[in-house]
Structure formats: C-alpha cells, structure tokens
Amino acid sequence: MMATSSIYVNVRIKNKTDCKNLVTALEHAQKAQAKEVVFSRPVETLKGEKIKDLFEE
C-alpha cells in the first residue's frame, strides 16, 4: 500500500527533452485503463468507530 503523501513529488525539468518525456508519460498514463483487482481473501471496509476499535485491541 502506498502512503497518500507519496503522490506529492517535486519535478524539476531541466531541458526540452525532459519536458517532452514528462508530457508523453502523462498522456500515456491518462489513456491507460486501470486493471481490475481480484482479492484472494475476504475484504471488509471499516469506517469510523470500527477503525478506532481495531486499534484499541
């Protein structure tokens, strides 16, 4: 699992080639479809008090 803060990254573009590569990568990512996730075990969504209860045990 990835931490939410990991999506914040400083990108330094030093030249025209880096700029083109970044734009190409972003355009490619936008067109790519997400893969369906199949869980191998049962999954339960926890909210609010259930999360607090989980960490109190």
Image (cartoon, rainbow, N blue to C red):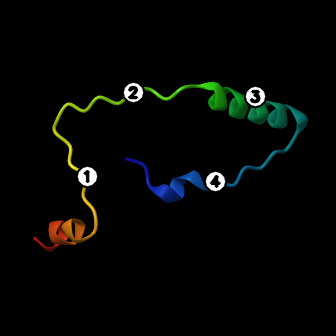
In percent of width and height, residue 11 lies at 72, 50
Tag nearer the camera, 1 or 3: 1
Residue at 88%, 39% in the rendered image: 15
Identity of the residue drawn at 83% across and 31% down = 20
State the quadrant of the C terminus.
bottom left
**Residue sitting at the far right:** 16
| In the image: residue 12, left or right of residue 32 | right
Q: CA distance from mark 2 to mark 4?
A: 26 Å
> Nearer the observer, disc 1 or disc 4?
1
Most foreground residue, 53 or 7 = 53
Distance between the alpha carbons at the discs numbered 4 and 3: 18 Å
Q: Which residue position is annotated with label 4?
A: 9
Disc 3 + disc 2, Cβ < 8 Å: no
Q: Does label 1 or label 3 sit earlier along the sequence?
A: 3
Q: Which mark is residue 36?
A: 2
Question: Measuring 20% from the left and 31% from the top, which residue is drawn there?
Answer: 40
The local secondary structure at tag 3 comes to: helix
Q: Residue furthest left?
A: 57
Residue corresponding to mark 1: 45
Q: Residue beneath label 3, please?
A: 24
Q: Nearer the viewer, mark 2 or mark 4?
A: 2
